[in-house]
Image: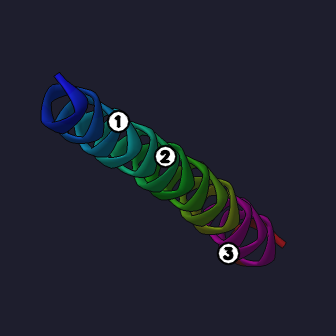
């Protein structure tokens, strides 16, 4: 019984870790996308000028 609790706790920790890394990756992707869009906008503005 105790072994079962330990393994379930371990799986839960892995899930939590996976979730946190996934959210970090999503945040990074959004940040990169915003920076990329900003660069494109500024480039288009300089070209139009």
- Quarter holding the C terminus is bottom right
Residue at left offset 78%, top offset 77%: 46
Image quadrant assignment for residue 43: bottom right
Distance Cα–Cα, label 2 vs label 3: 26 Å
Residue at left offset 32%, top offset 37%: 15
Which residue is the site of mark 2? 26
Distance Cα–Cα, label 2 vs label 1: 26 Å
Image quadrant assignment for residue 9: top left
Looking at the picture, tell me which residue is in the foreground, 8 or 39: 8
Q: Is residue 47 above or below residue 5?
A: below
Q: Residue furthest right?
A: 49
Q: Is residue 32 above or below residue 37?
A: below
- Between circles 2 and 1, the one closer to the viewer is 1
Residue 20 place in picture, x, y as percent: 51, 47
Q: Determine the secondary structure under disc 1.
A: helix
Q: Are marks 2 and 1 in contact (CB under 8 Å)?
A: no
Residue 10 place in picture, x, y as percent: 28, 45
Q: Earlier in the sequence, mark 3 or mark 1?
A: 1
**What colouring style does the render use?**
rainbow
Which residue is the site of mark 3? 43
Q: Is residue 8 toward the left or the right of residue 49 in the image?
A: left
Residue 44 included in the magenta stretch of the image: yes
Q: What range of the chain is rendered magenta?
A: 38-46
- Quarter holding the N terminus is top left
Q: Determine the secondary structure under disc 3.
A: helix
Q: Earlier in the sequence, mark 2 or mark 1?
A: 1
Distance Cα–Cα, label 3 vs label 1: 51 Å
- Mark 2 neighbour class, 10 Å CA radius: few under 14, some 14 to 19, many 20 or more: few
Q: Determine the secondary structure under disc 2.
A: helix
- Between circles 2 and 3, the one closer to the viewer is 2
Q: Are marks 2 and 3 in contact (CB under 8 Å)?
A: no
Which residue is the site of mark 1? 9
């Amino acid at each position: 019984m105790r072994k079962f609790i330990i393994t379930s706790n371990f799986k839960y920790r892995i899930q939590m870790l996976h979730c946190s890394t996934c959210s970090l990756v999503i945040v990074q992707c959004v940040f990169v996308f915003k920076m990329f869009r900003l660069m494109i906008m500024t480039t288009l503005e300089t070209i139009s000028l």
